[in-house]
Amino acid sequence: MRWLTEFYNERRGILARYVIEAPLPAAAVPLGRAAVLAEYPSTPRRSRLSLFERAERVGGQDASGWVLYRIVKDNGQGSTGVAPAQAT
C-alpha cells in the first residue's frame, strides 16, 4: 500500500512530502522520517539542550525538529484529498 506522509519542521518552516510503500501507516512513519532526515540532515548542536528543549522531545518531537504532520493513503494522483480546481 502507498502512503503519503508529510513532515513539518517549525524551526525551518519546511513541509516535506514523501510517498512511502508500506503495509501499515505505523510502518510508513519510520521510513518517511528516514527519508526526510536524508534530504534535510540536522545541523550539529554546539551547546547542551535546555530543560525546555529536553521536555519538548518527551512530548513527541525528536532532536531534528521534524514532526509527522499528516499521513494518508496515496490515491496515485499525489493529492492530499483536496479537489483540484475546475477550469472554466
Image (cartoon, rainbow, N blue to C red):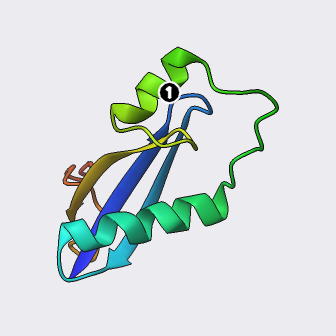
Q: Position of residue 86 (x, y in %)?
A: 23, 51
Residue 9 vertical placement versus 18 (above, below) = above
Residue lying farthest right?
Answer: 46
Residue 59, quarter of picture: top left
Res. 22 visible in picture: yes
Q: Which residue is mark 1?
A: 54
Task: Determine whether the residue tagged by mark 1 lies in a helix, strand or loop.
Answer: helix
- At 28% across and 49% down in the image, what residue appears? 70
Graded by Cα atoms within 10 Å as few (under 14), some (14 to 19) or many (20 or more), the crowding at tag 1 reads some
- Can you tell which quarter of the image residue 67 is in? top left
Q: Relative to residue 46, is residue 3 drawn left or right?
A: left
31 or 88: nearer the eye?
31
In which quadrant will I find the N terminus? bottom left
- Horizontal side, residue 42 vs residue 19: left or right: right
* Residue 87 seen from this side: no
Q: Position of residue 44 (x, y in %)?
A: 77, 43
Q: Residue at x 42, y 38 (%)?
A: 61
- Classify residue 73 as left or right of residue 48: left
Q: Is residue 35 above or below residue 64?
A: below
